Amino acid sequence: MSSLVGPDEDDPRRPDGSAKPPVPDHVQDAIRTLIEWAGDDPHREGLVDTPARVARAWKEYCLGYTEDPATHLSRVFEEVGGYDEIVVLKDIPFQSHCEHHMAPIIGKAAIAYLPTDHVVGISKLARVLHGFARRLQIQERLTAEVAQCIWDNLHPRGVAVVIEASHACMTARGVRTPGVGMVTSRVMGTFRSDSKSREEVLRLMGY
Ligand SMILES: [Zn+2]
């Protein structure tokens, strides 16, 4: 059988030699119960190792629970050369899971802020997004949490977050409407109080 499955599938060691994290029996049993509930036989050959794989995959989907996304914003740069305009990061792809069905949410985010006297490394904004996305979520809360985290930790004059995503619980089940996207936004500070700067930031974000 080893010729049919890749080394990662078959070998309890990872490519770097470290052991895969063990999965407790009760967790594997829960996934076997779900397979049975779905109508299949969890003991047939193709499904024998599935419970452990699914369990490890869920740890990975939910890695956000092991981190505080605010830590990504702790290192700031104060030499900004007098830059006091909007900073925008667009089209940041992300994956999350909806807390109602544990189904994938797949989408992209745009994050903007108006700095005071310091900026943050641009990749850190994406890390904040992923820190909150890798949890069981609803899109509205994800949007709000990303904006609030930037607001509280970077102390900018304004923050705007727009998230566009499709929800597998809508596209693959229920009303089955592939292609439908949901858009959520949160604007804070000057982007909220001043309609001109809100228009400007949304235009820069592509909305
Ligand atoms: Zn859902």
Image: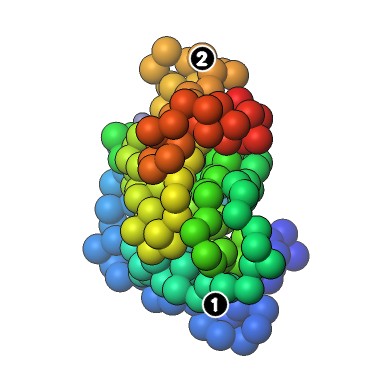
At horizontal 52% and vertical 49% (from top left) the residue drawn is 113
At label 2, the amino acid type is Thr
Q: Helix, strand, or loop for circle 1?
A: loop
The 10 Å Cα crowd at callout 1, few under 14, some 14 to 19, many 20 or more, is some
**Which is nearer the eye, 115 or 185?**
115
**Which is nearer the eye, 28 or 164?**
164
Which quadrant of the figure contains the C terminus?
top right
The 10 Å Cα crowd at callout 2, few under 14, some 14 to 19, many 20 or more, is some
x and y percentages locating residue 20 in the rendered image: 50, 76
The answer to whether residue 111 is above or below residue 184 is: below
Which quadrant of the figure contains the N terminus?
bottom right
The answer to whether residue 83 is above or below residue 182 is: below
At label 1, the amino acid type is Pro
Residue 12: assigned label? 1
x and y percentages locating residue 173 in the rendered image: 43, 21
Q: Helix, strand, or loop for circle 2?
A: loop
Residue 177: assigned label? 2
Tally the numbered discs. Answer: 2
x and y percentages locating residue 21 in the rendered image: 44, 76
At horizontal 29% and vertical 34% (from top left) the residue drawn is 100
